[in-house]
Amino acid sequence: MNIYIFTLILFTILVIVIELLLYAWRGSRDLSRAKVTSRRLQEYSWDNCWSDVHGEILKTRVLSSIPLLNSMLAKMNLVGRLETLVRQANAPYPPAVYIMLTALLGVIGFLVGGIVLKNQSLGLLAALVCCLLPCVWLQTKKATRMKKFAIQLPEALDLIARSLKAGHAFTGGLKLAADSFPDPLGTEFGDTINEINFGLSVPDALKNLGTRVESADLHYFIVSTILQRDTGGNLAEITASIAHLIRERFKFNDKVRVLAAEGKISAIILIALPFVMFFTILKLNPSYIEVLLQESIGKMAVTAAMVLMLCGIGIILKMIKINV
């Protein structure tokens, strides 16, 4: 590898590592509860939302604690999706950290594959896999959080319905649910209450809640609440009915999952069986497999078999996937 390219790669790694260490050091200095509360209040304050350039009340997008990097990332459309993903996953760091971490892992993967293993193609593949790791982690964290939110939602809606029947206001019911449930439901409802308390209308705050949380059941509740405010009706009964429907849907999904369990186990066995047989024969009688691995006709047979297996796996997965 060219010495200049190698020096540039090492310099890039050094800069990214220093930025990550500085960010971690700055974050470790702000651990007191008073500072955390002050920072959360500042996010909704007038001074933080006021824009002198455009003369509008806007909420500042903080993508990085570094001003120059924050202004650069704010102009990229792709960063907006990453910002939404980071917020939905409730990740502890802003998007800039994960962008730098992606670049760092990509460079490390390329160095390991290209220099240590002395294979440029393997280095590019390793770099691609390493670059996807932060995104995969965020997606997994988001999916886990959204699943937990869906489980908490029926109980929260019942609590809001009982609060409305007791004579409390709708915002009071939301506040009670936010205080009674942990993350993610308590956190998201708490953010909605903060937006309402700082002047945002209830429909707009609920729409923001629907944007932050990907849940069809929550969208039903939001649409029903907004329509009730426009047309009237008993919001307590509507909320209780939605909670009952969500529970019944959970029961139905559990029944479908049980009925489809046999098909899923059969699919796993059918997919794993060829590979188990291949490695077993390779261990017991290597000469029997050498024809497939060394001869041209064997390689063609293996390629055709892999293509057919992929088609079969796709058909099996399509058959066992039941959308309710």
Image (spheres, rainbow, N blue to C red):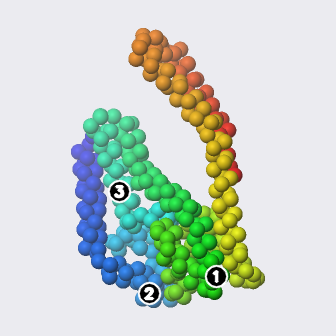
Query: Which quadrant would residue 96 be assigned to in this image?
Result: bottom left
Distance Cα–Cα, label 3 vs label 2? 31 Å
Task: Judge from the rendering whether residue 256 lies leftward or rightward of residue 298; answer left or right.
Answer: right
User: Is residue 202 in sight in this rendering?
Assistant: no
Q: Which mark is residue 189?
A: none
Q: Which residue is mark 2?
A: 45
How would you rate the neighbour count of disc 1 (Cα within 10 Å): few for under 14, some for 14-19, many for 20 or more?
A: many
Distance Cα–Cα, label 1 vs label 2? 30 Å
Query: In front of the other: label 1 or label 3?
Result: 1
Secondary structure beneath dot 1 equals helix
Task: Judge from the rendering whether residue 234 lies leftward or rightward of residue 126; answer left or right.
Answer: right
At 64% from the left and 64% from the top, the residue drawn is: 217
Secondary structure beneath dot 2 equals loop
Q: Which residue is mark 3?
A: 101
Where 15 falls versus 259 (above or below)? below
The N terminus sits in image quarter: top left
Q: Position of residue 154 (x, y in %)?
A: 61, 66
Query: In front of the other: label 3 or label 2?
Result: 2
Residue kind at label 3, given as amino acid type: Leu
> Relative to the observer, which residue lies in front, 307 or 296?
307
Residue kind at label 1, given as amino acid type: Leu
> Relative to the observer, which residue lies in front, 27 or 103?
27
Secondary structure beneath dot 3 equals helix
